[in-house]
Amino acid sequence: MDLTTTRNVLRSTAEKMVASEPELTRLDQVIGDGDHGLGMQRGFAAVVTLLDGDSCNPQDIGALLLQVGTRMMSSMGGASGAIFGTLFRAGGKAIAGEANLTTPVLSRFLTEGLNAVFQRGGAKPGDKTMVDALAAAAEKAQALGNTSLEKALPEIAAAAQEGAERTKDMVAVFGRSKTLGERSLGHVDPGAVSMSLILVFMAEGLVERA
């Protein structure tokens, strides 16, 4: 995807994330503070505003994703703002100068974003966080190598969904969910679902613009 297409796909993704607030809120009311959906809604509404504005004039894919991450971090608040903002900012910096979003470029974005999220919060796969979906996506992206993004992105999104689904079988060790202990079993992590939805909606956006 070139810069314009990536921007359009991100905008449609942001709109769909805003619309996902009720479901994300419902999931977080079960094992969290109940505010995850509202935080994601607030952050992605701010991303829509950013992408619609004249002040957003990135010269490459990395700069675009960096700006998105900065806006998310400043508007979402809480742990989600810090974590998802870190993903986009660090991932964007890692692909600075790239004119097109390809599978290898997305792989680098996801891998470096994952590393930054770990450094910031310490969560690793198996801890029942968004990292479970992100790590699964990063692993799949790396395995797909130079596969075209049109073919790879749905597989990467599916891997993220599987990673999010696996959090049902995990005991939370972060956030309010940690206080539930074994009672967090059987419930998916809302952050992992959000991570998977971002990639699912990106894949949908790419198909819509094909």
Image: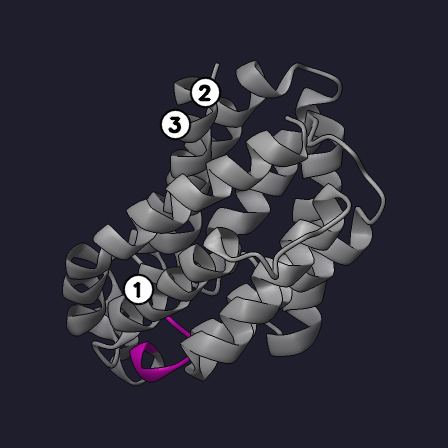
What's the magenta region?
A: 172-177
Q: Could you tell me which secondary element the residue under label 1 belongs to?
A: helix
Mark 2 or mark 1, which has the lower sequence index? 1
What is the spatial separation of the Cα atoms under label 2 and label 1, in whole angstroms? 24 Å
Q: Is residue 198 magenta?
A: no
Residue 201, percent from left and from top: 38, 37
Residue 210, percent from left and from top: 48, 14
The disc placed on residue 204 is 3
Compared with 13, 191 (above or below) is below
The disc placed on residue 61 is none
What is the spatial separation of the Cα atoms under label 1 and label 3, in whole angstroms? 19 Å
Q: Which residue is mark 1?
A: 41
Mark 1 or mark 3, which has the lower sequence index? 1
Nearer mark to the viewer, of 3 and 2: 2
Relative depth, front residue between 90 and 134: 90
The disc placed on residue 209 is 2
| Image colouring | one colour
